[in-house]
Image: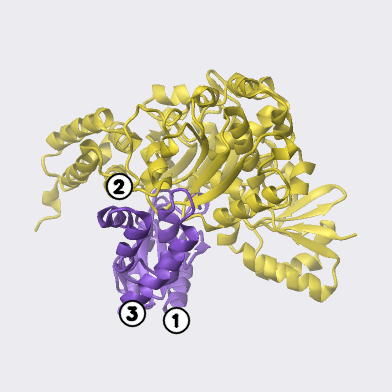
Amino acid sequence: MTVKIYIPRDAAAIALGAEKVATAMAEAIAARGVDAAIIRNGSRGMHWLEPLVEVETAEGRIAYGPVKARDVASLLDAGLVSGGAHPLCLGKTEEIPFLKNQTRLTFARCGVTDPLSLDDYRGHGGLRGLEKAVSMAPAAIVAEVTESGLRGRGGAGFPTGIKWKTVLEAQGAQKYIVCNADEGDSGTFADRMIMEGDPFVLIEGMAIAGIATGATKGYVYTRSEYPHAIAAMSAAIEIARAAGVLGQSVLGSAHAFDMEVRTGAGAYVCGEETSLLNSLEGKRGLVRAKPPLPAHKGLFDCPTVINNVISLASVPVIMDKGAAFYRDFGMGRSRGTIPIQIAGNVKHGGLFETAFGLTLGEIVDAIGGGTASARPVKAVQVGGPLGAYFPRALFDTPFDYEAFAARDGLIGHAGIVVFDDTADMLKQARFAMEFCAVESCGKCTPCRIGSMRGVEVADKIAAGIEPEKNRELLTDLCNTMKFGSLCALGGFTPYPVMSAMTHFPEDFSPAPIAEAAE
Amino acid sequence: MNTHLAGADVAERTLAIVGELKGLEGPLLPILHEIQDEFGYVPEACLPVLARELNLSRAEVYGVVTFYHDFREHPAGRHVLKLCRAEACQSMGGDRLAERAKALLGIDFHETTPDGAVTLEPVYCLGLCSCSPSAMLDGEVHARLDDTELEALVAEARR
């Protein structure tokens, strides 16, 4: 029987040499006459083990990693195709603690299936949610999603069902589903992993959203920095269309829904929903004032659902297993699971999907294994470039929207970037301002000008020029940006800046410049 | 791709691209991407054509081209090396690596080597944050870069 060997096609795996491993493996099995087929799966999310090669055996899938092209010969010599022993062997994939301790609902198939095989997708529970949805009344679908407690995974945490209800009730000949896949936050890659590793789940989620709200057209707006995701998503859409999952009659029903991928052009601010809509319309990505809400007047002024990739990709499992099943995971008002992305200076970096409620310390120390540099953890930035820096003293904060807000932070898109004790928090604060200045759309003054001034003030503090006065000025500037900006770019840049200054005051009191002078 | 193209040729090829994509909803970004793929940058000569064909003002088209970091107004080098400058890469020595790349190439960000071989650009996140620092050379991604690998990438780009 032909043995299945899995070698990921995920961009992280490719960046670490998966393409070379796949080529070497293909050549070696051909040369040796081994009866094996290579399947290019998504990533399991254990990125320190990538490229992670798996082989299907009678006992289940056995993992090897990290594999380099030069290891292929010795792996085959050791009996890779029957799960043979080798120094790189990690045992059964499902038994690796990092994976075993997860609750994979949204990412259930990611890394398991062939991302572009619709049969594989169906074989692993795919399309059951959509099959249910096509026979339900739109209002009942919306009720199910509302009941599940699902909140926007892009960062804002707005209840998805409420958004859908608004669009369902809005009047309009044309309505749209827009998927915000403009995943620009450093430390995040969940959207990318879904698009590359299980694109059909996003298609299914968007089709369900379309049926629930009466929208017939969908767009996935993603980043030009994600060429692998664009390719996988576009190919999956073609396959879904050919199979009747998309088109005039979704799964043979009376509902029509079709979609396409659109690529951004390197503007971080286009991850803000109204800026994204302007960009989709072919305009500069300027932020729009709200109201009107996109649910009433969104893309081309039509009622529009705009949701993050992970929100939409979580809908199929909710429709399949029911709102109660999903809602039973989590804590407080944060229901279900969240794919936490552990990044930066960390030993075990990758994606860890779990119910809300783990503490930050558990995530960084127990799951992430501390820093990659083996130095003490100084700070972790949670929620991307607009998220706060947390010191070790706040590691008891549970991963929950409200708990993070109560400590002047945000979980954002659930990316965590770990820094060791060599990090200079004044430099990080300056970078937050610099990034805001580079990426500001320019529409509102606090963001456009405030960020420029912020960089200058940070430089003055670093140079030891009237540090006390300038720290006060920086605080004042942050207040103006927080309350006076039109969107989260200017409004949230104060989070990293203020948290750095509050929790690491020693970095904001540099030694007097006189020491360096002659 | 290093020479500026003749206006008439640009206009003709721009018209063909517009003809192909005009039917899309909000066609300007897909058209600009296609133009950049075709010419390696967005030549000034295509702006009036786009304005006319899409019924926009030239200022509107120019505004869009200049708003987005991706669109170049001048040709890039034969190879484009993008280094990630965002926080996750910073935490793993990305800044130091960037300085090393600049020194190896003898240029700063947004510059091209005098022989036209390499353009160095910053990128704010390639989504490879769990295996930082990362880079992209002509669309190919590279992660967990150290000095040796960076030197190999630069050497590859300079060929």
Chain identifier matching the purple colour in the rendered picture = B
**Subunit ID for the residue under disc 2:** A
Give the answer, above or below, for where A205 lies relative to A71.
above
Query: Element type at marker 1?
Result: loop
Mark in the foreground, 1 or 2:
1
Classify 10 Å Cα crowding around label 2: few (below 14), some (14-19), many (20 and above).
Answer: many
- Quadrant assignment for the N terminus of chain A: bottom right
Which one is earlier in the sequence, the residue at label 3 or at label 1? 3
Give the answer, above or below, for where A488 lies relative to A196.
above
What amino acid is found at the position of numbered circle 1 in the picture?
Arg
Q: Position of residue A508 (x, y in %)?
A: 23, 39
Residue A431's disc is: 2
Q: Position of residue A320 (x, y in %)?
A: 72, 29
Please state if A28 lies on the left or on the right of A388 as rendered. right
Of the chain colours in the picture, the one used for chain A is yellow
- Name the quadrant containing residue A461: top left
Q: Going 19% across and 30% down the picture, which residue do you hit?
A: A476
Mark in the foreground, 2 or 3:
3
Q: Which residue is mark 3?
A: B3
Residue lying farthest to the left in this orientation: A518
Q: Which residue is mark 1?
A: B159
**Subunit ID for the residue under disc 3:** B
What amino acid is found at the position of numbered circle 3 in the picture?
Thr
Nearest the camera: B39 or B16? B16
